[in-house]
Amino acid sequence: MIDISIVVTASTPEWPGDTPFSCGWTWQMAAGASVNVSSITMSPHVGTHADAPLHVRDGAAPSEELPLEAFVGPAVVVDVSHLAGDVDRRALRAAGLDATPARLLLRTGRSIVRGPFPADWPALTAECAAALVADGLLLLGVDCPSVDRREAKHLVIHHALFDGGAFILENLDLSQAAAAWYDLMAAPVRFGGLDAAPVRAVLRPTHTGF
């Protein structure tokens, strides 16, 4: 299996202005306690996570309502790291994607896993996102911090996906995942009432051709 989750530490870059990861200790055996018990503070968007519709729309479904079926099942990794901007259907076909999968993971090469927060990254066009959802896409995952571009203000890709009943994974580590088909297991942690949830995402290679 390939672990495509980012290890979250105090040095993991958060979205600029968001709450970073920090940790401490409630009890420590070295201080005489019977157990070690840690505590953490962080935004749920730090590291690998699933966005909930509540992230972009007041009153929409929160984190505990994210459906498992979107995050578990066959998925395809497509490499778009050679692109600098918009990713449309033509670019996906050129990268080897002929038909719309249920779960699409885009390797942009702009991950936070080995460096600072990236200046920008490729993202689907709104037309491409809407077309993929209309064709049956259930999940879009990316190795960059967002399915929208960094400077996007209206988050049209988030809205296009959620409006069509699809869901979102962000901050994956696809550096060890070649462009191919896999079985994806990426269940969100069932925190209640949040706009996102941390995820431990894993790929298992299959024998299905790309």
Image (spheres, helix red, strand yellow):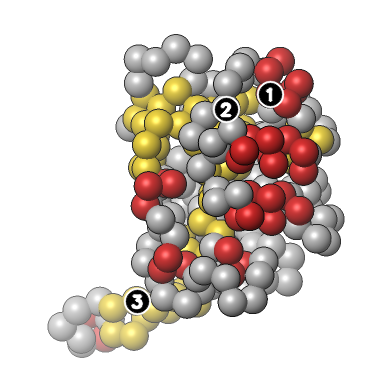
Visible residue check, residue 170: no
Q: Quadrant of residue 65?
A: bottom left
Kindly identify the residue that appears in the image at 57 percent across and 42 percent down: 140
Q: Which mark is residue 92?
A: 1
Instruction: Measure the C-alpha gap from mark 2 to mark 3.
Output: 43 Å
Classify 87 as above or below 140: above
Q: Residue at x 59, y 77 (%)?
A: 59
Labels 2 and 3: the sequence-earlier one: 3
Quarter of the image with the N terminus is top left
- Does residue 191 appear in this view? yes
Which residue matches tag 3? 38
Amino acid found under the numbered disc labelled 3: Ser
Separation of marks 1 and 2 at Cα, in angstroms:
10 Å
Q: Nearer the viewer, mark 2 or mark 3?
A: 2
Kindly identify the amino acid type of the residue bearing the numbered disc 2.
Answer: Thr
Q: Is residue 92 above or below residue 87?
A: above
- Callout 1: SS: helix
**Which residue bears the numbered disc 2?**
100
> Identity of the amino acid at label 1?
Leu
Describe residue 13's horizontal placement relative to residue 68 as left or right.
Answer: right
Cα gap from disc 1 to disc 3, whole angstroms: 44 Å
- Image x and y of residue 173, in percent: 53, 41
Q: How many marks?
A: 3
Q: Would you say 157 lies left or right of 2 here?
A: right
Point 55% across, 38% down: residue: 137
Q: Position of residue 146 (x, y in %)?
A: 67, 51
Question: Of helix, strand and loop, which one carries label 3?
Answer: strand
Locate residue 2 relative to residue 126 in the image: left or right. left
Compare marks 1 and 3 and give the one earlier in the sequence. Answer: 3
Whether residue 57 is situated above or below residue 133 in the rendered picture: below
The residue lying toward the viewer, choosing from 37 and 175, is 175
**SS for dot 2:** loop
